[in-house]
Image (spheres, rainbow, N blue to C red):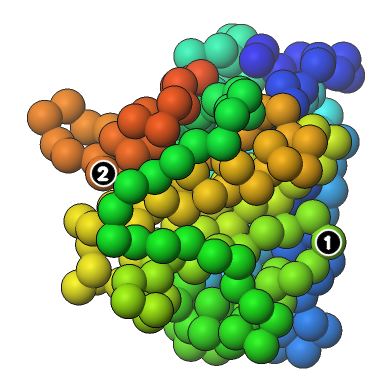
Amino acid sequence: MALQSKSHLTLAEEEVIEAKAFIDLHMIASQSLLDEERFSCMQIGRGCAISLPSAPAIGLNRIVGVSSLDELDAAYEWMREKSGRRYLQLNADALGQSTRDWISQRGLVPEGNGWAKLRRAAPTHPISYAGDVMTRRVRAEEAGIFGRMMCAGFGFPAKLEPLWSSIVGKRGWSCFFAELDGTPISTGAMYMSDGWAWLGGGTTVPEFRGRGAQKALIAARLNDGASQGVQTFVVETAEPSAGAQNISNANLVAMGFEKLCTRMNYRFHDHRRE
């Protein structure tokens, strides 16, 4: 996607559904969480800028889904006043020279290998998964458990548990546990809108990793989404490094996902004390 000033290009639906999920996450969050953690989000065109300084994850401190330099300007001015580690996500291989110049002029620098964006069509028949791990929906009264497991798995502070608890049972969201002998060991979430679904929230209790829980949860969400009319599923994972194992990416590829592109993470310059 080559960004152009004052002319909007068609934004890929794979980006739109991801932005929708994070906009909805912000809308669902409690007012106390918004106030206490300075959790804020601005919709920009069909994309968004989102800021949650106390979250260590790039996903909650970034600009995603912008489709013109005008939108990028608006997002940058909003985001530069936030605190924490902030990023702009763009497919570096598809940028025009004007956008490359814009990034350079503002001192944004690429960090790490970026994120791989993957996609697959809905299964035509339910996917079966053999193994000891069983999957099921998270019940409303288990929202707190879901939030605790998510924060523990992703290294979020405990004070952000209500953020993830809040999506359980909400319209458009499906949350799942993978269980071993009746005990939840892994989580997975899915946001659905207009025939598209975004997968996220996949984490497993460390001592139970390597048991197939994430593959089982991918299958569960594919089946659940397809039953609700989802036609296309998208997800992101860290771009695999040459010679290094990336279990998350490998699980997704094994479950039929194909890579679309690599999105680079351009980090904001820390122009003030934070």
Earlier along the polypeptide chain: callout 1 or callout 2?
1
Q: Is residue 183 visible?
A: yes
Please state the horizontal and vertical placement of residue 139, each as a whole percent of the image: 65, 78
Q: Residue at x 63, y 52 (%)?
A: 190
Q: Which corner quadrant holds the N terminus?
A: top right
56 to the left or right of 98: left
Residue underneath mark 2: 247
Amino acid type of the residue tagged 2 in the rendering: Ile
Which quadrant of the structure image shows residue 126? top right
Amino acid type of the residue tagged 1 in the rendering: Arg
Residue underneath mark 1: 171
Please state the horizontal and vertical placement of residue 226, each as a whole percent of the image: 69, 37
Dot 2: element: helix
Q: Residue at x 38, y 80 (%)?
A: 183
How would you rate the neighbour count of disc 1 (Cα within 10 Å): few for under 14, some for 14-19, many for 20 or more? Answer: few
Note whether 180 is above or below 193 in the view shown: below
Note whether 188 is above or below 126 in the view shown: below
Dot 1: element: loop
104 to the left or right of 130: right
For marks 1 and 2, give the CA distance: 30 Å
Please state the horizontal and vertical placement of residue 248, each as a whole percent of the image: 33, 44
Which quadrant of the structure image shows residue 207? bottom left
Note whether 1 is above or below 63 in the view shown: above
**Marks 1 and 2 close (CB-CB < 8 Å):** no
Q: Residue at x 69, y 72 (%)?
A: 168
How would you rate the neighbour count of disc 2 (Cα within 10 Å): few for under 14, some for 14-19, many for 20 or more? Answer: few
91, 149: nearer the viewer: 149
95 to the left or right of 24: left
Note whether 213 is above or below 8 in the view shown: below
Q: Residue at x 48, y 44 (%)?
A: 219
Please state the horizontal and vertical placement of residue 88, each as a whole percent of the image: 58, 41
